Amino acid sequence: MAEPRRESPLGRAPAAAPNRLIERPSVRVEELPFRAILVLHGRTGRPRFAQGVAQVLGRPPPDAPNTFVETRFGEEGVVIAWAGPEEWFVIGQEEGTSGLRVALRQAIPETDGAVVDVSSGFTLFTLEGRRARDLVAAGCSIDVHPRAFGPGRCAQTLYARTGVSVLQRDETPRFEMMVRRSYAAWLWRWMESSAELMAVE
């Protein structure tokens, strides 16, 4: 029996290149497919939970709402993003190629936390360039002005009527947006149209 075809929500196979791009003079959007995305549940007040996460990732998850931290798992860069009370997203580099999920499950007692792999249900987009912040602001109601939303900040919001998580990764500005697989194509088309309008302004 043939192996099932593995492809990103935008139809990209793992070996295919180049990646899906929206490229305009002032903004660039790229799909970041096949990332490891875990949902981490637990209480930072329980020492065994925080210690278990720190044992694997070098630090406990952030306590402050709407913030994320960058760390490492071996040679792999990892983000731990606050998703709600007692809940975080752990975003790794490559779906299915690291022992991230296994390592966290082994380090966190079942009575203190849980780890759920949702990699196949989501994809990420990166937005960067001079008008990346404008493109983010065009689709949602949260305040993404630098005074309110800068590097290390994240939020869950509706973007173009679609539930997403937005993270600002650096001052460029560069943002990452995580969206459910079933809405990825719609959101991509929306951003493509919006970027086109911005290009002629």
Image (cartoon, rainbow, N blue to C red):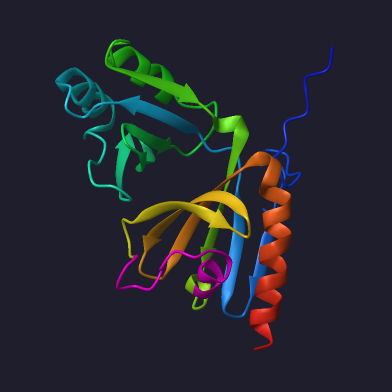
Q: Is residue 98 above or below residue 69?
A: above
Q: Quadrant of the N terminus?
A: top right
Name which quarter of the figure residue 23 lies in. Answer: bottom right
Q: Residue at x 55, y 55 (%)?
A: 158
Q: Residue at x 37, y 40 (%)?
A: 78
Q: Is residue 92 above or below residue 115?
A: below
Across the whole image, how many numbered discs are drawn on residues? Answer: 0
**Residue 20 visible:** no
**Residue 40 visible:** yes
The answer to whether 36 appears left or right of 173 in the picture is right
Measuring from the top left, give residue 141's x and y in whole percent. Answer: 49, 65
Q: Which secondary structure is most common in the magenta stretch?
A: loop
Q: Quadrant of the C terminus?
A: bottom right
The answer to whether 71 appears left or right of 186 in the picture is left
Q: Is residue 75 above or below residue 4?
A: below
Measuring from the top left, give residue 25's x and y in whole percent. Answer: 61, 80
Measuring from the top left, give residue 60's x and y in whole percent. Answer: 22, 33
Measuring from the top left, give residue 56's x and y in whole percent. Answer: 28, 25
Residue 76, magenta (yes or no): no
Looking at the rendering, the stretch of residues picked out in magenta corresponds to 134-149
Residue 146, magenta (yes or no): yes
Q: Residue furthest bottom?
A: 201
Name which quarter of the figure residue 194 lies in. Answer: bottom right
134 and 93: which one is in front?
134
Q: Residue at x 41, y 68 (%)?
A: 144
Q: Residue furthest right?
A: 1
Name which quarter of the figure residue 146 lies in. Answer: bottom left
The answer to whether 134 appears left or right of 24 in the picture is left
